[in-house]
Image (cartoon, rainbow, N blue to C red):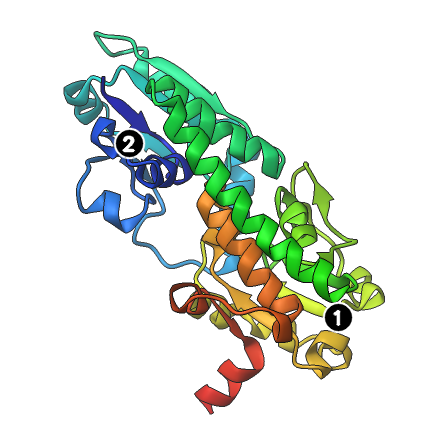
Amino acid sequence: MVVSSFLPAVTQMLYDMELQNFLEGITFECPTVALNEKTPVVRCVLEGKEYTSKEIDELFSASKRTGESLYYVEEALLAQIAPDIIFTQDVCEVCQIDTECTAAAVAKLQKEPLLIPLTPQTLEDVFDSALVIAKALESEEKGKSYIKTLKDRIAKVIDVQRIHQLQPKSVLLLEWIDPLFNCGHWIPHQIAYAGGIDMLSHPAGDSVVIPWEKIVKYNPEVLVIAPCGFGINRTMEDMKFLEEKAEWNSLRAVQNKQVYIADFDMFTQPSASTLVNGIECLAKMIHSEYYTVSEELSVKFSNYHHLIVANL
C-alpha cells in the first residue's frame, strides 16, 4: 500500500507512529525528516518569496474570495507514485491544499486513489485523526499506543496543577499579528490543559480578526504569539506592529514580562504529538515556576523580553 500526505500534520503522525514506510508523496511544508526522504508533490505559488504578514493575509483572502487556490499538485509526480490513499483536509483552505483541489488533481490519474479528508475541530478530534490514519494502514494498535502515550503526557501536566492547586491564568494566544487573529479550533483546549483560559478564543471554530481595543480591555496575564507558519525569528520581524501600539507597554503581560514567542507547529499544525508539545510548553509559559521542559522543547518558544535584551 502506498499513501500520500497532503498536509504536514498527517506526515508528522505517520512518522510518529513509525508508518512512514507507506508514505510517498508529501507537501513542500512537511517536516524536514520527510522532505529529506520523500517526494514533494504539493506546491504553493508563494514558495521562496518574501511577503509581510499583511501581504500574506491579503493574498490568501483574495484566494479565498475568488476561489483560486494558491496550492497546486505536481500531477506527473503524483501519477508516478500512484498512491492508493491520499490524506487531505477540509479544516482550512488557507493553510493547506483542500480536498476539493485534491479531487480535481486525482481525477486525471489512471488509478483513482481513496481520499481520506481529516477535519479536526477539537483536540480530541486530532487524536481521533491519528486513529483514522492508523486504521487506514491496518495498524490500529500503533495508533492506540500513540494516543495513550500522548494522553499520559497531558495527564502529567494536569497533575502538577492539581497537586499545587494552581489557579488558571488569563491567556491570549495570537495566530496572526497583522491583522490580529485570535486562536481557534483545538488551541483553546491546549491552553486549558496547560492551566490557562483564553477568553478571546474560539474553541472548535475558526480563528477570526479581533480589534486591538478588545485585547487592551481583556488585558491578559500571559500573551503568546505564534503566527501560523512562522518560527520565532520570523515572528520577531513583525513584533513592531504590536510594539508601535500606544497601549502595548501598559498591558499586564508586557509589564510582568509574560510575553512569549512560539513556533507555530505546536499550535496550528494539528499533529497530535506537536500539540501535546504545545501543551507542555504552554504550561511552562503560564506557570513557569512549576514546570520544566526538555531541552528539545525549550528552543520552541522564548520570552519576548529576553529576546529583546539578547538583541541589544
Tell me what residue is drawn at x 82 percent, y 63 percent. 218
Q: Amino acid at mark 2?
A: Leu
From mark 2 to mark 1, how far is it between C-alphas?
Answer: 41 Å
How far across and how far down the image is residue 160, in percent? 65, 61
Q: Amino acid at mark 1?
A: Glu
Are there few (<14), some (14-19), or many (20+) residues within 10 Å of tag 2?
some
Q: Position of residue 162 (x, y in %)?
A: 72, 58
* Position in image of residue 67 (x %, y %): 51, 28
Q: Earlier in the sequence, mark 2 or mark 1?
A: 2
**Number of the front mark, 2 or 1:** 2
Q: Does 123 appear above or below 182?
A: above
Numbered disc 2: secondary structure = loop
Q: Is residue 183 left or right of residue 229?
A: right
Q: Is residue 65 left or right of residue 75?
A: right
Q: Residue at x 75, y 78 (%)?
A: 246
The answer to whether one can see residue 181 in this image is: no
* Residue 279 appearing in the image: yes
218 versus 117 height, above or below: below
Front-most of 244 and 128? 128
Q: Residue at x 27, y 50 (%)?
A: 32
The residue wearing badge 2 is: 19
216 sits to left or right of 45: right
Asked whether the beta carbons under mark 2 and mark 1 sit within 8 Å of each other, the answer is: no
**CA neighbours of label 1 inside 10 A, class few (<14), some (14 to 19), many (20+):** many
Name above or below for residue 80 compared with residue 235: above
Q: Which residue is mark 1?
A: 221
Label for residue 296? none
> Which residue extends farthest bottom?
312
